[in-house]
Each structure stands twice: as structure tokens, then as C-alpha cells.
Image: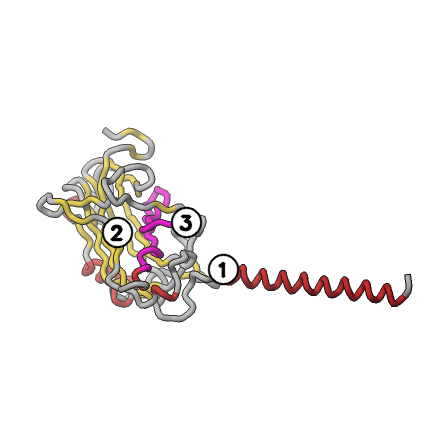
Amino acid sequence: MSLNTYVEKNQRRLKERKRLIAFLSIFAVLGLATATYAWFTVNTFAGVKDFELQISTGDDLRVSMDNHGSDIEQYTHTITNEMLNSYLQKNYDKTLDDIILDPVTTNDGKRFTYQDGSGAEPNGDESYFEFECFFIATKAMTVHLTTEATDENGNRADGTKVSTTSPAPQSDIVKAIRLAFDGEGNSVKTYEPNKGSKVTALTTFDLPSGTMDYNSSNSLFTLEKLTPKKVAVRLWMEGEDPECDNDVQRANLRVRLSFAGIKGTVNGNPVA
């Protein structure tokens, strides 16, 4: 083989390697763009406009922002914005008006990170919303999230709903929201309104649009008779969700949570 032929072959190999490297580099950039497309790219965020938590069934199940032990008369059927504001002022020197949702992500409903991987803390300047409350029941039961509810007079009322008064495309924010319920001694359960394709390792559930079917997917935690249980409720915008993009910025969010106590099993044991 002549020297010129050898040099020409090496030059061709070098060009092929350069083309391959260029192709791989472009592929990597495209992959990064796809993975991060859902996240906000400018800093105007969504806010929690209104939040209400209500018990939908009789006197058997009650709730409070404080632990009153077994004195069930100290518990109520509703947690209002005013109660949440008192909680936030006491623990974070904030109110609901100060809560700004910044896209975060989580694989377990407990630990949250921003897009760059840094840790996010609840109720910060731009992060996610979290509060703790205490549920108690007059009998052992399993607590479910429900779309069915009754008012104080026993009449049918609206149950769980995540909504917005913002116009399209900001209204798509209701598809990017997640709510996690972390009851002591129970696994974290996560509600995804308008559930779409799975985007993280976190398992989520949606609620039916018609009659409720109370089952293991929408059960949140269990209660022993007259034994209060602390439950952490976390609300966030899932940055990995395809709907969590610039279109939903500046949107407001309205959240109503309704709970039903169903006799079933507690800690795997039948309940009469």
C-alpha cells in the first residue's frame, strides 16, 4: 500500500468519525430538549387561588388542623382557607396568597426537586404547597378521596374537584397538578386529575366522572377508632407533565377535596 493510499484511508475514517460524533451530539441535544420541554422556561408562576377540604359523610369522620386527641367534638367537617392561612402564618409566615407553584418533580410524593436536581422545600417563595392535618373517626375505617359529597343538611353536593377560572390555554394547568396524601403508617397515595400517561416513577390515580367505586386505588389511609392520624397533604405542579409548559403560567388554581370513610379493613384486618 502506497503512502498516499494510506493517508487517504485515514482521512476518510477521520471524516466518518467526525460525522458520527456530530450525529451523536445532535441526538443528545434533541433528547435533552424532549426531556425538558414540559418545564417552564420563564419565571412567571401559577398560584393557589382557593383551597377547601371537606368531609362528605356524616359524623363518623372528622378533621382538624390540630391534634385534639380522642376528643372528637374538637374536630370539624371542613378545613377552610382561613384555617390554612392560620397554619401558614404560624409555621411559614405566609398566607395562601403568597403560595406560588413552581414546577417540581418527585418519584415518591415526599422528596421534591427542581429541574436542575436541587431540593425543593414546601411553601417556599416558588415551590409546592404542603400542610398537615389530623383525621379521626368514631369507628375503624378506610378513608377515600371521593367525587361524591353531601352538605350540612344531607343534600348532594360537589365533591373533589381541581379547577381554574383562567382561560385556555392557561386552563391546562388542571392537567399538570398532583396531590399526595401521606398518612402516618400508610404509603403515599397520589391523585392526578385528568390523568394521562405516566411521566415519573410515581404511581397515581384518577377519580371517576360518574358514580364512585371505592377501591384500593382511591383509598388513602386507615383509621383506628378514636385515634387521630396526622396526614400531610402536598400539592404541586409536576414539571415532567407535558401540560406543565409556558402556556399555563399565571393561571390560578381552585382545589376542593372531599373524603369519605368506608368500613373495610384496617391494617389488613376485617372491620365490622
Q: CA distance from mark 1 to mark 3?
A: 15 Å
Q: Is 190 contained in the magenta span?
A: yes
Q: Give the mark nearest the N terminus, 1 or 2.
A: 1
The image quadrant of residue 140 is: top left
Q: How is the image coloured?
A: secondary structure
Give x and y (percent) for residue 44: 35, 70
Residue, disc 3:
197
Label 2 neighbour load within 10 Å: few <14, some 14-19, many 20+: some
Q: Which mark is residue 133?
A: 2
Q: Quadrant of the N terminus?
A: bottom right
Label 3 amino acid? Ser
Mark before the other along the chain sequence, 1 or 3: 1
Q: Earlier in the sequence, mark 3 or mark 2?
A: 2
Q: Which region is colored magenta?
A: 172-197
Q: Residues within 10 Å of mark 1 (few under 14, many from 20)?
A: few
**For this view, does 178 lie left or right of residue 227?**
right
